[in-house]
Amino acid sequence: MTNSIPSSGRNEAERRPDIIDTHAHLDMETFNSDRAGVISRAQNKGVSTIITVGMGLESSNEAIKLAESNPGILVMAGFHPHQASQVKEDDIESLVSLSEHPKVVAIGETGLDFYRNYSPRETQLRVLEWQLELAVRLDLPVVIHCRQAEKDILPILHNWTSRHHQSGGTPRGVVHCFNNVIDMARQYLNMDFFVSLGAYIGYPSSGYLHDVIRYIPNNRLIVETDCPFLPPQAYRGKRNEPAYITYTVDTIAGFRGETWETIAIETTRNARQLFAIPQD
């Protein structure tokens, strides 16, 4: 594994390539007391952009407000599968209005969660399909949450990508916090999805992911924190935050036998491509 990332303030950001945290939940209450400090610490570590996630209409609206006051923050707006039971079809049109905001770069996170099952499965499936069609309608990438639901979600995504490719569309997306085997990664990659990894890849229990990390092509890999969840091993039991994404870049570099700078450059380039983020 490569050496730990030194802590040296702004000079560190100036020396290193920038990084994009493609998945954070900065609107959550755990950040209320020091949100500005969290953003500043991320910038000091070279995190040029943070994409903060809406989990419903209220959360998406709060994310947009946060992005409006912070130039380095962008938004994905959508309905998390946990909230699916609260979503009515009319809410999709409200999501359209939010998603037309210039700071919104993706629809999500949407998907299926058959582990928690906070919403009925049939409701999760319906709300997922609504958002997939909305992503195509708005020409935005879709961000997929999938937990113990691969058997159901993969046929839906295969159908969605095939149907829209045949009609001349360009459906695109990413599976966030990928945590499965090479065969599953291959299926997402064959649909032209990106694969996003977080700090959990460094947990002792994640040894089975090492081959997957080496398998993902350089042009299909992005990184995220999913903060405040899933902190690096060194911070287990504590709140995660965007500044810690450097640990994920470091871990990936070690497993792939590449430099920290190479992984930072490649994942940032990929994120800019997927989310249509212009170079500053």
Image: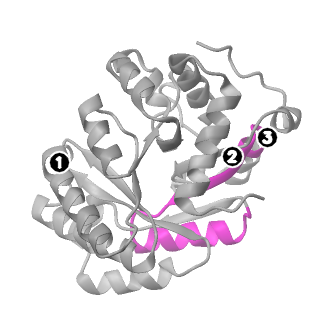
- Give the spatial CA distance, label 1 vs label 2: 32 Å
Residue 27 highlighted magenta (yes or no): no
Q: Of callouts 1 and 2, which one flags the residue occurring earlier in the amino acid sequence?
A: 2
Residue 161 placement, left or right of 77: left
Residue at mark 3: 44
Q: Could you tell me which quadrant the C terminus lies in?
A: bottom right
Circles 1, 2 touching at the beta carbon (< 8 Å): no
- Residue 222, label in figure: none
Q: Relative to 254, is 86 above or below?
A: below
Q: Secondary structure at mark 2?
A: helix
The image shows residue 98 at horizontal and vertical percentages of 49, 80
| Residue 224 visible in rendering | no
Query: Which image quadrant: the N terminus?
Result: top right
Q: Residues within 10 Å of mark 1 (few under 14, many from 20)?
A: some
Query: In x, y percent, where is residue 142?
Result: 40, 62
Q: Magenta stretch: give its range.
A: 42-71
Q: Nearer the viewer, residue 75 or 218?
A: 218
How many marks can you see? 3
Point out residue 41 in the picture as x, y percentages from the top left corner.
74, 41
Is residue 220 visible to us here?
yes
Residue 236 % position (x, y): 49, 25
Residue at 73% of width from left, 53% of height from top? 36
Task: Name the residue carrying label 1.
Answer: 114
